[in-house]
Image (cartoon, rainbow, N blue to C red):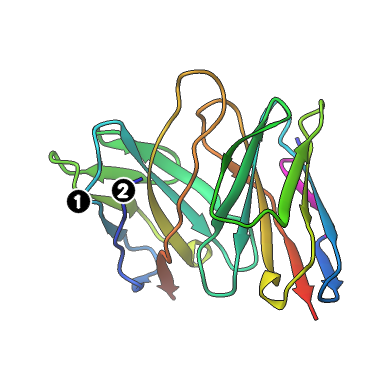
Amino acid sequence: DAKTTQPPSMDCAEGRAANLPCNHSTISGNEYVYWYRQIHSQGPQYIIHGLKNNETNEMASLIITEDRKSSTLILPHATLRDTAVYYCIVSSTPYSGAGSYQLTFGKGTKLSVIP
Amino acid sequence: DAGVTQSPTHLIKTRGQQVTLRCSPKSGHDTVSWYQQALGQGPQFIFQYYEEEERQRGNFPDRFSGHQFPNYSSELNVNALLLGDSALYLCASSLEAAEAFFGQGTRLTVV
């Protein structure tokens, strides 16, 4: 799986958009970009994933550059409850047969939402 | 739906002992993965089970073994515990290639 690079920490004012960058310059054509977050003392929580098109769900938006070498996770209106470590992960999905993908976590970005 | 449940939540063991951790996947999920998370680090993949067989394995020694039952629940066994095995052990369940749902983890302390 391709390696990802994320800033170790970021601050964001409450109510503002949080933009979390991720570099994945060695991503291959069949690899997806996944974002998970981990709030202190809890298990990681799935946020969103995408292949090459921008994606949006109720939690966040994922913007992937045209060359797919980087992406940005956007939390449109950050709240104090969004304070967490955010992990950007690149992984292929074995659509042949059942079974899931292996997630390779780095150290992520610690996002602090400031009141 | 109870989501992914793990037991116990906390555990203290002595070096050299054996431990068994348990995981019940989210309803309808057939694939279970186990991760180890040391303090200050991201989770590290241990192995994945599907149809009661180990499908993938990370870079962990044979002291780490697992099992999946017909109802898709799973166990993680660690033999000959070392101090370095102290960590949060996370179970994740999924269905085919969908996103993984994680449990709250079992905090293992080896003394």
Residue A103 position within the rendered picture, expressed as x and y whole percent measured from the top left: 48, 47
Vertical arrangement, residue B93 with respect to residue B86, above or below: above
Q: Residue at x 50, y 28 (%)?
A: B97
Element carrying mark 1 = loop
Which one is earlier in the sequence, the residue at label 1 or at label 2? 2
Residue A100 position within the rendered picture, expressed as x and y whole percent measured from the top left: 53, 32
Vertical arrangement, residue A39 with respect to residue A93, above or below: below
Instruction: Tell whether position B6 is magenta.
Output: yes
Kindly identify which residue carries mark 1: A25
Residue furthest out toward the top: A97
The amino acid at mark 1 is Ser
Q: In this rendering, would A80 be left or right of B73?
A: left
Q: Residue at x 73, y 73 (%)?
A: B82
- Mark 1 and mark 2 in contact? Answer it, CB < 8 Å: yes
Kindly identify which residue carries mark 2: A2
Can you see residue B65? Answer: yes
| Chain part drawn in magenta | B3-8
- Looking at the image, how many numbered discs can be counted on the residues? 2
